[in-house]
Every structure is written in structure tokens, then in C-alpha cells.
Amino acid sequence: MKSKNIDISYPLLILAPLSNFSDNGMRVLSKKYGADITYTGMISIYNIIKNDGIDFKILPEERPIAIQIFGKDEELFEKATLILNNFADIIDINFSCPSKKILNSESGGFLLKDFEKIKKIIYRVIKVSKVPVSVKIRSGFKKGDKSYEKIGEICEELDVSYLTIHPRSVTDKFYGDVDINVTKNLKNRVKIPVVHSGEVKSYLDAKKIFQETNCDGIMIGREAIGNPWIFSEIKNYLINGKLPLKVPLDKKIETIKEHLNILINLYNEQYVIKQMKIHIPHYLKGYPGINKLNKLLNGVKSIKELLNLLTNFRFL
Ligand SMILES: Cc1cc2nc3c(=O)[nH]c(=O)nc-3n(C[C@H](O)[C@H](O)[C@H](O)COP(=O)(O)O)c2cc1C
């Protein structure tokens, strides 16, 4: 049994899975500005099975897309995979989420404590998947745990298409430094491609991670929120040595409208407003009108009001 190879060139730049943030707009724009793969936020296998996958709205412009799944029971992972075969370009399994709710349900990062279970889950997903299968982990459950070493072996043995490591423990959540020696060590130990996730905020960080760990790809998470240009900045620098230019305000407003229109074409007004309220402050952070904008955004109830606010932003 073998997972499929990913048919794109390395080094990979990937939009990280970001629950609540990585919507179609963020994915299309990340792709437009140079991401090689985009991700959904994690989705419960139980919900996939219950809805029979009908909720997936995926545009050609956001592919290749990895649909990330979490859960506990290997039989249900297999069932969900059969549904995802119709939607995903890659199926990614989450063994990394540190949220209390997920840990209490014995999913996500909780499973880093149970290698046998991890093996069973990956096996069942790869067995029925028609697309490449990848896995996302942290270094271990507790600080100092080296679970990634054993899981690396399991992923290699089962021929996972690539393995992403966020080199912090589950109990670290998002605090403290990422340990890039963990990424480097994992890369040295396995033959499958390794992707690093964590604290890549600039083209210089990207260069450092690629150079020091020899990894095959990097994920960009928080830095890509309101900043899809991070992907082209990294690519231009790595390929041509070109330094990034500041993105002008007009371009940012135009991009926000592009993001908005992508969502308008897919969802109802309420959902679109909810999403834009979380994205707009990130696109416009650092500008003098940002505090006022944040207050006014709170009261926005229609897309028309949202557009007016954007038009007047420079006068706030
Ligand atoms: C708001 C938010 C939501 C996230 N959602 C997910 C998720 O659904 N699945 C996942 O594997 N990781 C998730 N992560 C973790 C990121 O994918 C990434 O591994 C982590 O943020 C470190 O990368 P960064 O420093 O580039 O943000 C999330 C992180 C944040 C901040």
C-alpha cells in the first residue's frame, strides 16, 4: 500500500490550516500570490460523515487543496476518506491540535500519546484514499517528548506523502520558541518529504528554515492572515534574491474587496460579514485609522456598510 506522490516541485510553500480563518477567500488569494498548496481548517470526521460531504465548496483557484481531518475512530476515518475522495486533492490527518475540547475528545494532539492508534488511523485512510495522504504532528505531547521520531518511522513505513511538523509540544500550545532542531532531526531520519510549520514570518525566516533544516516545504500560518503576499515575497527572494516591496494601501483595499467577492459568490451575507470582520483588521493593521475601523467594524450589519467603511478608511 502506498500513498500517492504529490505532483509539484519542492520547496513547497503551503498555507497552513487555520480554523475560522482559512476560508475560500484566504485560500484563493494565498494561491494567487504563490502558495503551492492550501488547507482547510480541521474538520471532524463525524461531521463529514453526517453531512456526506455536501458542504464542501472548493473553487478551482484554491487547488491543490488539502482537507484536514480529525477524530478518534479508525473505522470512521476510513468512512470519511471515502467521502473526501470526491473533494480533496490531499487528505491531511491532524495529530497536533492542542485545544481542550479536542484533547477531551481524545483526538488531535491527544493521539500523540498512542502510536498504535496513529498507525491504525493512517493505515485506514491510505487504504481507501484516492489522493495523497499527509499527516500533521507536533514534537510530542509534553515538552521534551520525542514522539515525532517514532511517528516519522510510522509515516515512512506507511508511505505517507509528506509529514508536517510544528516543533512545539501539545502542552506548549503556541507559546515559546519553535525548536527547528526537531524539524532538522526529523528530516534526517525519514525519506518522505518533511514540511516545517511554525513562526515563519518573513522571507528571511523561510530562508533560514530551509537552510538549517533541509526541509522540503514550509507552512505559513498566522503571518498569511491579511497578508497573502508573504508567499510571493518568499518565492521571489528564494528564487531570484529579490527583496519585497511594501504593499500599498490601495492594493490592500482592492485585495480585501477581492476576498469579499469570493465569499459573496459562495455564502450568505451573514457569514460573509462574520468572516470579513475577522480578516479586515489583519489586512489593515499598522495604519493610523485601524483603531477607529475596528470599532466601526463591530457595528457593521450589511455588505453595503462594509464597502462604505473600506472606501472611507483612509479618512478615518
Ligand atoms: C487561529 C488558528 C487556527 C489553527 N487551526 C489549525 C487547524 O485547524 N489545524 C491544524 O493542524 N493547525 C491549526 N493551527 C496551527 C497552524 O496550522 C500552525 O501550525 C501554527 O499556527 C504555527 O504556525 P505559524 O507560526 O505560521 O502560525 C491553527 C493556528 C491558529 C493560530
Image (cartoon, helix red, strand yellow):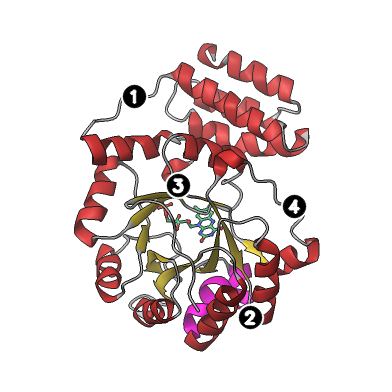
> Where does label 1 land, which residue?
246
Query: Could you tell me if the residues under marks 3 and 2 are in contact, i.e. CB atoms within 8 Å?
Result: no
> Residue 55: which disc?
4
* Quarter of the picture holding the C terminus: top right
Determine the CA span between mark 3 and mark 1. Answer: 19 Å
Label 3 sits on a secondary structure element that is helix
Viewer-side residue, 116 vs 4:
4
| Residue 147 image-quadrant placement | bottom left
- Image point 74% across, 38% down: which residue? 267
Viewer-side residue, 188 vs 256:
188
Q: Amino acid at mark 2?
A: Glu
Q: Give the magenta range.
A: 100-114
> Where does label 2 land, which residue?
74
- Image point 63% across, 68% down: which residue? 101
| Residue 143 image-quadrant placement | bottom left
Label 1 sits on a secondary structure element that is loop
Determine the CA span between mark 3 and mark 2. Answer: 31 Å
> Where does label 3 land, which residue?
222
Residue 204 spot, x, y in % from top left: 24, 43
Query: Could you tell me if the residues under marks 3 and 4 are in contact, i.e. CB atoms within 8 Å?
Result: no
Q: Earlier in the sequence, mark 1 or mark 2?
A: 2
Q: Earlier in the sequence, mark 3 or mark 2?
A: 2
Q: Earlier in the sequence, mark 2 or mark 4?
A: 4
Q: Amino acid at mark 1?
A: Lys
* 173 shown above or below 71: above
Q: Residues within 10 Å of mark 3 (few under 14, many from 20)?
A: some
The reply to whether the magenta stretch includes residue 109 is yes
Badge nearest the viewer, 1 or 4: 4
Determine the CA span between mark 1 and mark 4. Answer: 37 Å
Q: Earlier in the sequence, mark 3 or mark 4?
A: 4
